[in-house]
Image (cartoon, helix red, strand yellow):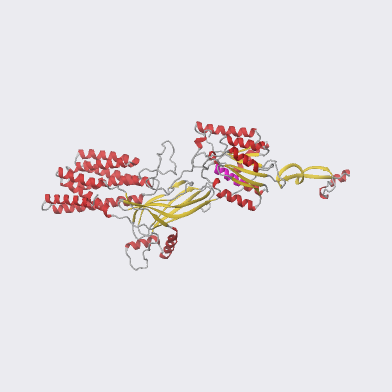
Amino acid sequence: MSARSRPDHERADDDATDAVHRSAVGDDAVEEEVADESDRSTGVAESTERPTGRWKGVSALAMILGAAGVILSRPSLLLGSVVAVGYLAYVRAVTLPEVDVSVERSFDESNPDPGDEVGVTVTVRNRSDRVLPDLRVVDGVPDPLPVVEGSPRLGTAFRPGEAATMEYTVSAKRGEHEFAGATAIVRDYAGATERELTLDQPDVLECTPSVDPTREVPLRALTSRFTGRVETDDGGEGLEFFATREYRRGDTLNRIDWNRHARTGELATVEFRKERAATAVLVLDLREQAFLREDDEGLHAVDRGVDAASRVFTALLETGDRVGIAGVGPEEVWLPPGTGNEHWARARELFATHPALSSTVADGRTSVTLRTRRLRKRLSPDDQVIVFSPLCDRDVLRAARLLDAHGHLVTVISPDPTTEGTPGRDLARAERAARMADLRGSNIRVIDWAPDEHLSTAIDRAARRWTA
Amino acid sequence: MDGVSDAVDGAAGADGGGGGGTDDAEGPLPEDTVPDPREVTRKPTTLSAGLAMLSAVVVMALGGMHSVLAFGIGAMGLAALAPAVVLGSRTAADVGGGILLLAVVATGAVAGEVVVLAAAVATVLAWDLATNAIEMGEQLGQEADTDRAELVHAGATLVVGTLTAATAFVVYNLATGGQPVTALVLLLLAALALASALRL
């Protein structure tokens, strides 16, 4: 279809059709180029013609008016039946036009963040020299992307060479989304026959979260042997004064407390507070039960959890901590703790493209006990755990307590998916609050993160309570 | 699930998806919720629906000028067509078209040729546009920009009807100058022969 030869613009005639064509597309050379480009990109797959059968009643009209005219001896009614016969002839005469259209799609933002609204403009152009009286186009918007404004559907008529655009806005979700192609239905003037076509125009909207690190992630005092920023209760190399002790052979000269030596004649060594790096494993709740949101519009708790995890991950790497990623869901996700640029790149790819971390709801049941047991085997004794979960069932609580019992310090960052208004919602909210209180009671830190709040604000708010 | 089901949603509501055919299964819209912008309102498109109602009013008015009976039947047709173009029922549209046809018969029993021709065209227009509004609504939904396709369709139907009616009227007037009865019978035969030749 798309390989149809284009009307010859060079030919020197000034028929009306061509004039319309020219005025609609402007410069011929430019148009030629555009057309060539879309020749490659827009493929058309067609189904067979099918009658719509919507004019069947008109023959009844002819018969009834004619019969009534004879019975009532009214010439006017007989004449009326001619109108119906005229329509029958019209339906018979019209044919389905050949379709030669191109589809172009453009996004107003090429790499949006999750939750951003992306405007999509689809231009449909009739490239044949025939009129398309009725073309209905439905753009192939990928399932996870909700259309928030406008409609990806268009019904219009085309003069030769004419183009029509439709604009709509989708809300971006994390991952790669392929706009497959548009489905179109072409009809003749009367709508007596129609044909369904697929206008192939693949475009990919890639939405990788920009990982602005959150300001600082409060890690707990369980550390590794690497230098870092978590302050320990241990003296040694560092910045902050910690204690003085008796001089031992081998202590470096610049650590000797010379003032004290001048005062008392004793040799003493100054010790500083050791600052160590921590190892943290980010555990994401990816179960079906965690796909909760406060209304039909917002992001799922899993989406927000993954977003928070990517920020926390970057923040921790920047401060020199070792970070790993684990997922509790139908599909296994595991990135062993590590550090450095290569690790960061691996994690970034995982956050952006791993199917288990995508915005589509995970299918299948997850055994939290089994996953926790496997996770526990992978953790080294000093690792601390940051759990990202909406805390909407008790399984997560049990898992967090189990990890805590095995000596891992647990922090829970919990995107709040609850809302209020109905008794059911109030109950869900109260139950979640009770679960958070429960966790806090067993020495597990919980950061409650409201939907419209910045993650760093939520962390600050929680940190104030811990220090108080 | 601890009663959170209020907040639960499955997959993000999908629009488009490349369906577009008339076979898209769509549940009824819940009445108590605010319409979701992502949901396609598969109700008849408003432009064609309005034009269909207008045509039905024309049929009723043409009948009303000549007989109370025709006016009454026309009003019934209008009443049957209204739910068709609001709710999107093909059956209601066919019933409405049928009643309007009876109104044309009632009009023709007393009125002259021009009125009957106009009423017949308006009847076809009302029924065709109502059907088109329903189909357009099913395939594209009310939110889509469909005005141009609807106008072209309505225009084509109107022009074809007007041309046929005008031609018939002219031929009839020329023919009835001499032998009215023969002309009528021939016209009838021609119409029926054409209809059967077209196998419609």
User: Picture coordinates of residue A395 (x, y %)?
Assistant: 58, 35
Mark yes or no: residue A289 visible.
yes
Q: Which residues are magenta?
A: A302-312
B170 sits to left or right of A203: left
User: In the picture, which quadrant includes the C terminus of chain A?
Assistant: top right
When asked about the image quadrant of residue A272, the answer is: top right
User: Picture coordinates of residue A262 (x, y %)?
Assistant: 87, 46
B55 sits to left or right of B137: left
User: In the picture, which quadrant includes the N terminus of chain A?
Assistant: bottom left
User: Picture coordinates of residue B180 (x, y %)?
Assistant: 12, 50
Closer to us: B47 or B29: B29
When asked about the image quadrant of residue A265, the answer is: top right
Q: Is A335 drawn above or below residue A365 in the view shown? A: below
Q: Residue furthest left?
A: B178
When asked about the image quadrant of residue A370, the answer is: top right
Please name the predominant secondary structure of the magenta segment in the image. helix
Q: Is B186 drawn above or below residue A7 in the view shown? A: above
Give the residue at x 60% y 47%: A310
Q: Residue furthest right?
A: A265
User: Picture coordinates of residue A203 (x, y %)?
Assistant: 48, 54
Closer to us: A109 or A408: A408
B116 sits to left or right of A366: left
Within the magenta stretch, is there residue A367?
no
Mark yes or no: residue A214 visible.
no
